[in-house]
Image (spheres, coloured by chain):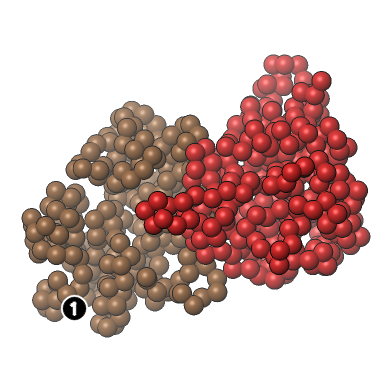
Chain colours: A brown, B red
Amino acid sequence: MPSLEKARIISNSKQYHNLYIMEIEAPKTAKQCKPGQFLHIRSNPGLDPLLRRPLSLYDVDKKAAKISLLYKVVGKGTALLADMLPGENLDIMGPLGRGFSLPESAKKCLLVGGGVGMAPLLYLARELRRGGNELLVLYGVGNEKELLALERLEAIGSQVQIATIDGSRGLKGPLIPPLFSEILSNERIEFIYSCGPESMMKLWQEWAGINHIAGEVSLEEYMACGVGACLGCARKARPDNEFYVKICKDGPVFRLDELELE
Amino acid sequence: MDLTVNLGGIKLKNPVAVASGTFGYGLEYADFIEPEKIGAVIVKGTTLHPRPGNPGPRIYETPAGMLNAIGLENPGIEVFLREYLPRLRERQVTVISNIAGNSIEEYALMASLLQGQEGIAGIELNISCPNVKQGGIQFGTDPETVRQVVAAVKKETSLPVIPKLSPNVTDIAAIALAAAEGGADALSMINTLGGMAIDINRRKPVLGNVFGGLSGPAIKPVALKMIYQVYREVDLPILGGGGIVNHIDALEFFMAGAAAVSIGTGNFVNPCLALELLEGMEKYMQEQGFSSIQELVGIAHT
């Protein structure tokens, strides 16, 4: 069951450019977390910005009751979050939303994370490895300094292939299927998980369709309530559907066969 | 400390309600707050037929507030009665149903469908949603139409009827008086203020619906002024709200003339606000020597 908690900030530091990792101690919340869910956090006790911000669970250590959050400073709310200091309290609500599903029997899984889209995939990778799954992670960023999750991904025993736009590490180019065609032609992928820009995920959805591979993606949207009460974070699962799904409650994780990415 | 309120015939265990559209159908927040402890839960605006709502983006944050243009997405009154109401009844939630119609006849028809339904304490009439276009008719902005809608609904139901007034009018007191003439049992005010935002990179309006409704602390002074004004001119209990995020805000509304208050956008910031406010209010009342919330209603009027 999700809860409200004043979590204690253990660390909060800039990793590169506008990318930050915050680690919090949240005994009530941590033990409830599942990969792909999010915390609805309040970065400011004042009135501006007013609303909470949804942040993915980047990593969770249930034993130590610790949660890590990887975030990118994009506006007022995340800028205030970046200013918070160890020892301060963070007002968190969660975990919320529908997370990733984990295979019942061990599978070979492909994880495709673009930029800060890696945020929900590290904790997923950890749980998948715990379940004995074999992982191939395709990690795409602008340049190698943004590969924040790389060490942790390798430490849990996943095979990581890198693409950078500037060619500073791994393959040079965007995180799209053609770039990895040779690597993928030798793999027998049974399930795909992805998070990142939607245009990128759309290409992987098509790739998965051609190869008859099931999978899941994590979406993001502006949110107000985070629990399906305000109906603010709506989108159509398919363009010709009449009704809308809510990212906060029906997602943020959706099966590839549930929606048509744009 | 007496915190009970009689809001036009609706007995409230405490004077803090949660506003329609901010609390779903009452159970979405149940992991964080027990809805049966809240003074009243005003459920999501419901129409005769299901409505998909507006294309996104539907919400956008503004300084000390937010814009929304949900467009009354709801499953329709039949689904509300069949699937949601029984669960609320089971938990003994004080439910105020919120209805929105396309015509006076449709409001009346929905009122007749609610009549006799166990578990509904009253009806809030949404005559002021800024995000729905209905053939050019704006029910909430013409006094005569307001009177007719309220009268038509009153004819079909014995439940207390509370029209929710739009602030997007020149003279809110005239609308309030018309609602009273139509037989309203109480008034709910205010709905959101019309607003918009523009994305300078796309050079287009942010909201899918172009226009939305502004809510949150940004509109509190407007809401207070309108409640103060209507309290002077109309002898009906007022359910007041608009940007309440703490007990000080709430106390201001009582003093302006609200008999009860509603929390809207504040629920998104703190889902427990509706109950946490009570503690602050009680503390104030104790310290200042008040024994009943009713003593505070309209006390700012001299």
Relative vertical location of residue A43 with respect to residue A1 in this rendering, above or below = above
Residue B153, percent from left and from top: 86, 59
Residue A244, percent from left and from top: 52, 67
* Label 1 packing within 10 angstroms: few (<14), some (14-19), many (20+): few
Q: In which quarter of the image is residue B134?
A: bottom right
Q: What residue type is labelled 1?
A: Arg
Q: Can residue B130 be seen in this view?
A: yes
Q: Nearer the viewer, residue B151 or B254?
A: B151
Q: Nearer the viewer, residue A3 or A207?
A: A207
Residue, disc 1: A188
Identify which residue is drawn at 31% across, 55% down: A120
Identify which residue is drawn at 70% across, 50% down: B42
The answer to whether residue B255 is left or right of residue A152 is right
Residue A258, percent from left and from top: 42, 74
- Element class at badge 1: loop
Figure quadrant of the C terminus of chain A: bottom left
The answer to whether residue B269 is left or right of residue B187 is left
Identify which residue is drawn at 48% across, 56% down: B205
Identify which residue is drawn at 70% across, 33% down: B224
Q: Nearer the viewer, residue A114 or B40?
A: A114
Relative vertical location of residue A83 with respect to residue A224 in this rendering, above or below = above
Residue A192, percent from left and from top: 27, 71
- Label 1 marks a residue whose chain is A
Q: Is residue A248 visible?
A: no
